[in-house]
Amino acid sequence: MFGIGVFIQLSMPMTDLYQIPNVRGIFFGFIIAAFIFLFLTGVSIRVGSSLLVSYLALSTFLALGILYSRAPVYGTNKAIMTVAYFWALGTVIYNLVDDISSAKLFLNGLVVGGVLLIGITALTFGNPIDMIRGANRFFRLRFGEEGNPILLARHLALAITVFATYVAIRRRWIDILWCLPLSSLAFMYLIATGSKGPLAALIASFIGTPILLVRGAMARISVALVVGGVFLVGAIGVLAMLPQEFIQERFVEKIQNLSMRLPAYKIAMSAIMDSDPIALLVGHGTGDFGYLDLGKDARSYPHNVFLEITYENGLVGFGLLAFAFICPLLALMRVLKYRLAPSHHMLLAGLTASYIASVINAQFSGDLGANLFIGMLGAALTSIARVQAHDPAYSQVSPSFGVGSG
C-alpha cells in the first residue's frame, strides 16, 4: 500500500513534467502485478461490494456505449481508463486496505509521494513567488508543448490534504514544522498553475467535510466558519504577493467568462434537451461529445462529468455514475454511528476531504477518464469505513454522531 501511494502521487504528474512515455501502460502493469500479488498470497479477493459493482456496471455501460458512438476511438480510450482506474485499481485498493494499519500505510505512501512531488516541482521551476511575480499577463505554468498544469494542480491539492491528515492523526509538533512549509510551497505552486478547479475543490472539501463528520448545526457552522476563515486569511496573504496582472488574467477575467466552460455546458445541456427518448435514456454513445463539439473522432468534453455522461450515456449512465459517487459517502455515514478513536476519525476525515475534492473537481475540469482520483479515493474510503464498522472494537453504537463521539 505504501508503494501504491507513492506511485500514484508521482506517476501521472511526471508525464507532464518530463514527458515520460508509457506511464499509463506502466501503471496498468502495476495494477495487474497487485492482482497477482493478492492471488499468490492467498487473499480472497472481494469484488461484490456495492461500490465495486457500481464501478463495474458503469465501466460496462460505457463500453457498450462505444458501439453507437460517432467517436469510438475517444470513447474506447475513456472506457479503458474508467475500467483501469475505477474498477481495477479500486478493486486492488479495496482489498489491500483491509485494516487500520494498511490504511495508514497507504496514507504514508501518499505523504512521501507528495514530498517527492513538491521537491521535484521545486527543482524544475524554482521559487514560486519569483516565478509568479515575473510572469506576464498571459502566464500559466507550462510543461512543454502539450503539457497541462491541471494534472499537477490536482496532485498538489491532494498533497496538501494528506499532509493535513497526517498531522491531525499524529498530533505532534515536529510534524507541523515540516508539513506547514511543504503545504505552503505546494499551495504556491498550485496557485502558479493557474488552475482554479483543483483550488476551489480543495477549499470546498475542507469546508464541507466537517458538515458530514460533526454533529449538530451550530458545531458544523462553527467548524466550517473557522476553516473558511483560515483559508480566507491565507488567500489574502497569497493575493498580496501576486502581481495584479496575474490576478486579473488568471482569476478575475477567467471567472467572469468561466473560461471555456460555460459554452461547453450550454452545448451539452442543449444537446441533452433536444435528444429523442432513446438517446435521452441511453445517450448518444461514449465519447460522442468529441464529435458533437469538434465534428470528428477526437477528445473533447464539457468539463462536467455529469453533463458528459448524461449526454453520452443518458439517464441510465447518469444514474450509474451518481450511485458510484454516493457509495463511499453512504459507507461513511454508516460507520459514523460507531465509537471511533480520534486518530481513526481523522483518517476518515482526510480520506473524505480528498474524495470530496476529487468529485467537485470533476464538475469543472477533465472528462471521466481524467478524474482518476475518484475511483482510488472512493475505494479507500469505502474499505476503511467497512473495516471500522465491522471491527468488534467499534460494535457499540455511539449515542452521539460524528467527531464528537470519539
Image (cartoon, grey):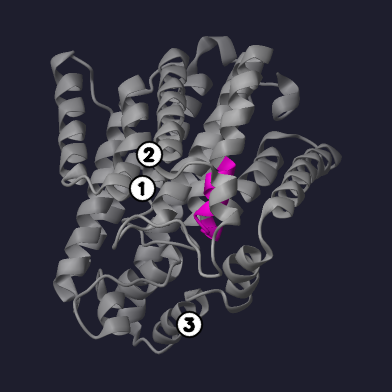
Q: Is residue 200 above or below residue 344?
A: below
Q: Which of disc 3 and disc 1 is earlier in sequence?
A: 3
Extreme top residue here? 393
Q: Which mark is residue 372?
A: 1
Q: Position of residue 341 (x, y in %)?
A: 63, 15
Q: Which residue is mark 2?
A: 376
Provide the residue span drawn in magenta: 187-197
- SS type, badge 2: helix
Q: Which mark is residue 173?
A: none
Q: Nearer the viewer, residue 343 or 46?
A: 343
Question: Mark 1 falls on what kind of element?
Answer: loop
Q: Are marks 2 and 1 in contact (CB under 8 Å)?
A: yes
Q: Amino acid at mark 3?
A: Pro
Distance between mark 2 and mark 3 Cα atoms? 30 Å
Question: How far apart are labels 2 and 1 at the CA level?
Answer: 7 Å
* Residue 263 disc label: 3
Q: Residues within 10 Å of mark 3 (few under 14, many from 20)?
A: few
Identified by mark 1, the residue type is Leu
The quarter of the picture where residue 46 lies is top left
* Residue 103 in picture, x, y percent from top left: 44, 21
Q: Quadrant of the N terminus?
A: top left
In the rendered image, the vertical position of residue 94 relative to residue 121, given as above or below: above
- Magenta span: helix, strand or loop, mainly? helix
Mark 1 closeness class: few <14, some 14–19, many ≥20 residues within 10 Å: many
Q: Is residue 128 left or right of residue 398?
A: left
